[in-house]
Amino acid sequence: MGAETAVQAFPALSLDDKRLLLALARETLLAYLSGRGLPDYLVTSAAVLAPRASFVTLRRRDSGDLRGCRGERVARRPLIESVMHMAMASAVDDPRFEPVRVHEVPGLHIEISALTAPQPIRPEDVVVGRHGLIILAGHSAGLLLPQVAVAYGWNREQFLRAVCEKAGLSPDTWRRAWVRLEAFEAEVWGEAEG
């Protein structure tokens, strides 16, 4: 994967697809946290039915504070199912937070990141704001979405150091020849504010 990384060819997500996925993520949270299981859906859009990995990020609307974020780095199921499962995981399986309770859901903002397949990348080819990073070193792994580096104003080296720290590694581990560094791109959208 070089500086001219080609975005993996997925069917394009329309505005309606994105709205559907956001609405279904919210409906999934409400149904699952209420003990009703997963909601049913009927879609024909090739874009939401294509196998694709996703992350779902939950933030408090009033403060913007992170409330949960979970995802998968490898496509294991259709995007629509990935979003539903990651919405549930963000609510109840982020070890940094207590599980979300159903009464909190109206006060949460939902953001979805649909990922391309990870590809090996050299550190010098990482483009901040374009690439998300994965580091794999022995039994340690860490992942940061592309928008994280932008939000914190990191340069390339700060981003590389941060993904190492996310994996529980020394900040300079990315410089080691035996480390596997991968990059991906993400289509990111969220609910309207307000």
Image (spheres, rainbow, N blue to C red):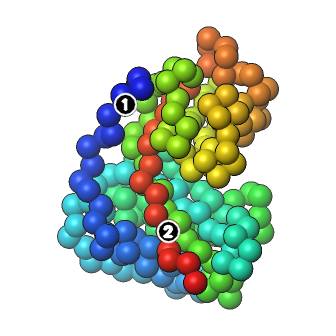
Q: Which residue is mark 2?
A: 190
Residue 45 is situated, as x and y percent measured from the top left of the image, at: 22, 67
Q: Residue at x 63, y 44 (%)?
A: 149
User: Is residue 139 at least partly visible in the picture?
Assistant: no
Q: Residues within 10 Å of mark 1 (few under 14, many from 20)?
A: some
User: The residue under label 1 is which amino acid type?
Assistant: Thr
Left of 64 or right of it: where is 8?
A: left
**Which quarter of the rendered picture does the C terminus lie within?**
bottom right
Residue 60 is situated, as x and y percent measured from the top left of the image, at: 69, 74
**SS of the residue under disc 1:** loop
**Which quarter of the rendered picture does the N terminus lie within?**
top left
Q: Residue at x 62, y 13 (%)?
A: 178
Q: Which mark is residue 96?
A: none
Left of 39 or right of it: where is 61?
A: right
Q: Nearer the viewer, residue 18 or 138?
A: 18
**SS of the residue under disc 2:** strand
User: The residue under label 2 is which amino acid type?
Assistant: Gly
Q: Residue at x 74, y 57 (%)?
A: 95
Residue 42 is situated, as x and y percent measured from the top left of the image, at: 27, 77
| Quarter holding residue 15 | bottom left
Examine the rendered structure and indicate whether residue 133 appears above or below residue 123: below
Are the residues flagged by discs 2 and 1 in contact, CB closer than 8 Å? no
Q: Choose the circle earlier in sequence order: 2 or 1.
A: 1
Q: Residues within 10 Å of mark 2 (few under 14, many from 20)?
A: some
Q: Nearer the viewer, residue 8 or 43?
A: 8
Q: Residue furthest top?
A: 177
| Quarter holding residue 30 | bottom right
Q: Residue at x 79, y 26 (%)?
A: 170
Q: Which residue is mark 1?
A: 5
Q: Could you give the CA–CA distance between mark 2 and mark 1, rounded to whole angstroms? A: 25 Å
Examine the rendered structure and indicate whether residue 106 appears above or below residue 185: below
